[in-house]
Amino acid sequence: MRKMLLIVIAATMALPLFAMGNQDGGSRTVDRYDNTYQVEVKTLNYFLLLDTTAQRVAANTQDHLVEQDRFGRFIPSLAESWTPNADSTVWTFKLRKGQKWVDHTGTPTTYEITADDFVEGFRYVSDPANGIRNISSVRNVIKGLYDYYYTLVDIDGGKIQDKTREAALATFGTVGVKALDAYTVEYTLTQPTPFFLSYLIMDLFYPVEKAFLDAVGPANLGIAKENMLYSGGYYLSDWQRDKLIVMTRNEHNWDKDNITVRSINMQKVSDPTVELQMFMRGELSSALLSAEQAKALEGSPFQDKVYMTDLTSVTFWWHPNYQSPNPEFNAFIRNENFRKALYYGIDHEKFLSLDDQVNPKGLIRSTIIPEDQCFDEKGRDFTDYPGVKEFKDRGNPYNPAKAREYLAKAIAELTDGKGSIRGVTAGPVDMKPIADFSVDGKLPIQMVYVHTTSSKSTTEALLFQAMMKDTFGDDTINVVLGQFVDNAYREAILPLKYDMMWSSFRFAYADPMAQFGRLVTDGGFLNMAVDSSKKTNTLFDKTLYDLVQAAAAETVLSRRYAAFAKVEKHIQDKAYIMPYRAGGGSYTISRMVPYTVPRGGFGVTRFKYKGMIVESQPLTAARVAELRTAFFEEFNKLTAK
């Protein structure tokens, strides 16, 4: 049985990299990595990571107290050691001495990285005025944070008028994040949390230098390379918006000898066809391929260089909008039978064949919590608990007959028998600029599916539209296609301009609450079971809310997981969201040697380049397979009980 790999002794260090050799025609290592990004960021504020571009920059230009090695074990970073108390409610970290912040030229500043910087970083994320999205993940974890945060919320909202904002900010000392001395930081938690180390690689736990933050102003942190200081293995040496991001090795970093690539160059490229062409010209170190591109390389000199990446902890799911401005969809999505009709009406295997024509089943993930990430005190995987394993083993739920049966029940419950939807009147629906249409309050139901402007996303949208028609006919559901240009969260999800889309979450820390907290708790992503005393909600499930609260209160992992298994089962039985795909599993062609970078399903680990080895020639698929076998043989030895 496997051990939980994520809680390790403080002094554990990474094992040396396995020998790489020159197996691809005498390929040699190079010290530059060239890749691309698609989404331009508005800010590189490393506490406010809204897209993968910002996450990649933050992961490499800032260090945490701890990090993960290439096997996923927690090892020292800016903290050289740590000690939890007996029940894991107080964690004390000893920092390295003499570590300096560097500026955008790589020059050390006069600022030393101290315990106060971690306190100031948490002070920043704890202020609701700074708009940090992920704070809900830890609001109930750090002692005193919930009351501190909501006092500020209530002052800002006018509910508290007998206390000033300045007076509330002065009470931050009640929050369980303290500098005991210049090189010791202590976290006090609300309950035993043996998996606390996995929180510490989230963006919420980065340090910040207060004097520098005060000088640039909180609102300006990260708007330019000059408006940040850097504590990590790289610093941001160039940032040309909509064109180029360059990160250069920090020669003053505590671990610079293990940062093997000196320069990370990220060019903005929106067209995957151009990306492949650039790789073939030698301008990129890696390129992700569509299934069509991979097939087109058959018979070319690159045929034996295409391989499939490993799956990740990121989970993709169908994401309905429970606060849709579309009254027809709004009426139906609250109906359990309609949600189940959608659940059984989408052919996940067919949809995923756009990514992998050979083995689309291999990409399916049918659980909200990913496998191989959460292990109890006996090494049991959360996804093997009753209530979750059934969904894990289910695979593709597509069943058109069952889907039509559920839709018929929903229509009977929500219409007058003559095709008119109860409570819905005709009128325009404003989802501009994504979609602009009218409803007549009658069948077929108008359902807006939102996608990007990319060719792949458009193909996915057309396939989804065709699936709905094939499964349900065109007299019950009419899929209207709408587009956003750049960022799903800012353009569609936040302003609620969609009915249906796919979405994904990175797995933030080593506990089921990492996902369920985003879905069903106060301030969560879907707000299906929020505390109504703090936030008005349009879909409150008291049973679900109580299940989450009961599970979150358990501190023994096996009991906690058994309780959270009931949460997952309830969400899936109600079809509130519909998981369908694991992250990763992409066709790629690369000069980067796999299994040389940090491994981990939490926080920003999967974006780190430390330890990466890049070669001058593309790796063959055969060599990657050999490296994969060797890596997992070693990995399994480490995780075997």
Image (spheres, grey):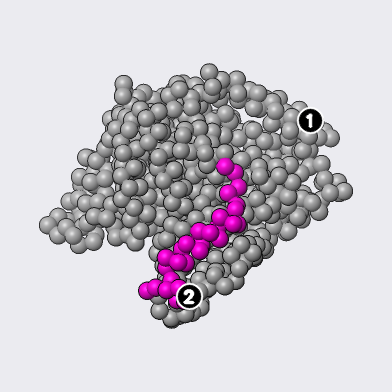
Element under label 2? loop
Question: Residue 259: image x %, image y %?
Answer: 59, 34
Q: Is residue 420 magenta?
A: yes
Check the image and name the residue furthest to the left.
162
Q: Which residue is mark 2?
A: 419
Closer to viewer: mark 2 or mark 1: 2
* Of the pair 478 and 619, the residue shown nearer to us: 478
Between the C-alphas of marks 2 and 1, the distance is 69 Å
Question: Mark 2 Cα within 10 Å, few/some/many (few <14, many 20+)?
Answer: some
**20 left or right of 111 in image:** right
Q: Is residue 321 above or below residue 126?
A: below
Tell me which residue sits at (78%, 42%) in the image. Answer: 305
Tell me which residue sits at (80%, 31%) in the image. Answer: 23
Question: Residue 227: image x %, image y %?
Answer: 44, 53
Disc ID at residue 22: 1
* Of the pair 446 and 312, the residue shown nearer to us: 446
Question: Mark 1 Cα within 10 Å, few/some/many (few <14, many 20+)?
Answer: few
Tell me which residue sits at (43%, 57%) in the image. Answer: 336
- For badge 1, the amino acid type reads Asn
Q: For the magenta stretch, what is the residue range?
A: 394-423
* Of the pair 204 and 517, the residue shown nearer to us: 517
